[in-house]
Amino acid sequence: MSILIENLSKNFGTFKALDHVNLEIKTGSLVALVGPSGSGKSTLLRIIAGLDIPNSGRIWLSGKNATSLSIQEREIGFVFQNYALFKHMTVYENIAFGLDIRNIDSFVILNRVNQLLQLIQLEKFSDRYPNQLSGGQRQRVALARALAIEPKVLLLDEPFGALDVKVRKDLRNWLRHLHEQVPVTTVFVTHDHQEALEVANEIVVFQKGCVEQIGKPQDVYDNPKKGFSITSSSIYMRFPLLNFEQIKGQDKSITNI
């Protein structure tokens, strides 16, 4: 599903969170939204999901005006930083939840959940509860639950922000590999510049509620927009030039996180 953001604005009192934002996201893309805190990244994500309402502008999903559609009608999966798993449900029950409330046939649910358990490499953990899992495992369950309903768009709001550095690195490698297997249009918010460079196939830089720059990861790294320098933003920091081909060849196994 493609996403078109047309002249979108959102205010919270006197604070302008989004200021006439225009953005096009192609079907099957893996896009990172980056920028300083308060620049509008998460606000845009919530508006796309239908969790917030814009003051002006429109959202188009595959050519259909979705600005006034309900959350359910948008066919979007959303993953939060804090996982938001149901503590009283097992891994299996958490993943199956969205299918259960849609009255999907139990045999279809069984097959779908088992496929996702295999995809996230947690087949042996289906009967465990969230408090029996590591942070990385809980986040994978949250991703599987979002994918269970076969959404047309997957939105991730700082999905790895609460995890330690080692787990985050392993999970972002896994997310990139997951997107190759399930190429649903994916948009994620991150404060981690390296995460955006390694995972996304396109980066959108936000600043003060506006889109500052759009480009491929290497282009954004090599040619940051004039006026958006390393010293004036938390996004551009001094780290060695990434070898993207080497990154792609990294181990995709996440069984230990």
Image (cartoon, grey):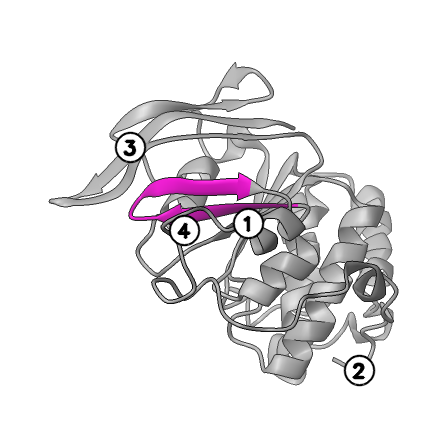
Q: Residues within 10 Å of mark 4 (few under 14, many from 20)?
A: many
Q: CA distance from mark 3 to mark 2?
A: 43 Å
**Disc 4 residue type (three-letter):** Ser
Q: Which x, y percent locates residue 158?
A: 51, 61
Give the residue pinned by disc 3.
9
> Which one is nearer the viewer's eye here, 247 or 218?
218
Q: Which x, y percent locates residue 44?
A: 40, 42
Task: Choose the circle earlier in sequence order: 1 or 2.
Answer: 1
Do labels 1 and 2 touch, CB within 8 Å? no
Mark 1 or 2: the one toward you: 1
Numbered badge on residue 205? none
Give the residue pinned by disc 1.
223
**Disc 2 residue type (three-letter):** Asn
Task: Choose the circle earlier in sequence order: 3 or 1.
Answer: 3
Indicate the quadrant containing the N terminus: top left, top right, bottom left or bottom right: top right
Quarter where residue 239 is shown:
bottom right
Label 3, secondary structure: give it.
strand
Mark 4 or 2: the one toward you: 4
Q: Which x, y percent locates residue 179?
A: 76, 49
Observer able to see residue 129: no
Give the residue pinned by disc 4.
42
Numbered badge on residue 256? 2
